[in-house]
Image: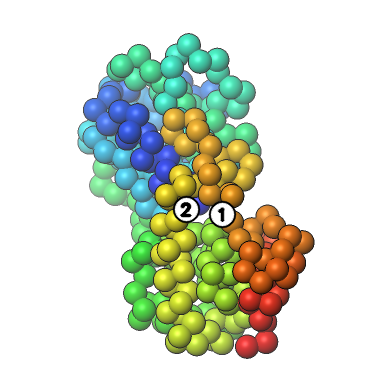
Amino acid sequence: MPELPEVETVRRTLIEGGLVGLSIVSVTVAHPDAVHWPDPARFAREVTGRRFVDVRRRGKFLLFDLDGRTLACHLRMTGRLWLSATTEPELSHTHVVCALSDGRELRFRDVRRFGGFTLLEPDGGMAPSLLARLGPEPDEVSAAAFAAALQRHRRSPVKALLLDQAVVAGLGNIYADEALHRAGVHPARTCGSVSKQEQKVLRSAMRALVRDALRHRGTTFLDFRDGAGEPGAFQAFLRVYGREGLPCRHCGTPIAKRRIAGRGTHFCPRCQPEGE
Ligand SMILES: [Zn+2]
């Protein structure tokens, strides 16, 4: 569920919260599913004593630069990562707790348990499988690369292309639907049918959408919280996602929902004509 704007909001709020410069005093792994690599005991041993040097993001991955090692975290569907006082009661499904040098804790909670941490090997050994396949960020997709990807996937629905992390890193079901509505492109149209002009509009729609969502600190649809435990506010500005049957904000036509590219997909039948 958390997509680029939410993950970036977590990154920013962790930095605002003062994570950089703090060290990890101890690590408690309450559920092994939350540590994807290496095993929980080695994981705890390897990160304990290290200091947070920076927090970066790539696609939907958070990258914690510790001195000497990088720790990747993916929130997947329900992962939450936030700075907490030790006195705050521990929520259920809190699977990893890092005690920090200022007396606070970095807590990781994940109800569905798909998310978790991967410690990247110092030589980048684990990194290729995780990060090298990621395409450019939405604001870095060049016209040429986007045109080539559409051509390569010309028989696939354009919705599938926007979800493909190798084409654009960071978009998921919410922002793919929103970008297509902004661009007036029906999600089931084939990539090959998207004109040069539409490609241009779609690329700038992705950029503007991510910028707008970041300004509102992401979308809280079910349970997203940022690195300070606060919800986002962009849900109030969604144009199609989660609005099935409600009037299109542009033309008033009821928003439709259909399974496209294997995902429940929202669109306006009038603003996004299919037969074009
Ligand atoms: Zn409409």
Q: Answer left or right for 97 relative to 154.
A: left
Q: Answer left or right for 184 relative to 151.
A: right
Q: Position of residue 85 (x, y in %)?
A: 43, 17
> Considering depth in this image, is 14 or 36 the residue closer to the camera?
14
> Considering depth in this image, is 80 or 218 the residue closer to the camera?
218
Mark 2 lies on a secondary structure that is helix
Q: Answer left or right for 158 relative to 226.
A: right
Counting residues from the N terminus, which is met first, the one under dot 2 or under dot 1?
2
Which residue type does callout 1 highlight? Phe
Q: Position of residue 203 (x, y in %)?
A: 43, 72
Compared with residue 72, is residue 237 higher up or lower down, i.e. above or below? Answer: below
Asked whether the viewer can see residue 21, the reply is yes
Residue drawn 44% across and 30% down?
A: 228
* Quarter occupied by residue 186: bottom right
Q: Which mark lies nearer to you, 2 or 1?
A: 1
Residue drawn 62% across and 45% down?
A: 221
Mark 1 lies on a secondary structure that is helix
- Residue that badge 1 annotates: 237
* Quarter occupied by residue 72: top left
* Quarter occupied by residue 160: bottom right
Where does the C terminus fall, quadrant-wise? bottom right
- Residue that badge 2 annotates: 213
Asked whether the viewer can see residue 1, the reply is no
Q: Position of residue 17 (x, y in %)?
A: 35, 29
Q: Position of residue 265 (x, y in %)?
A: 67, 64
Q: Kindly check if marks 2 and 1 are in contact, taking CB atoms under 8 A apart as contact.
A: yes
Q: Residue furthest right?
A: 245
Compared with residue 223, is residue 136 higher up or lower down, i.e. above or below? Answer: below
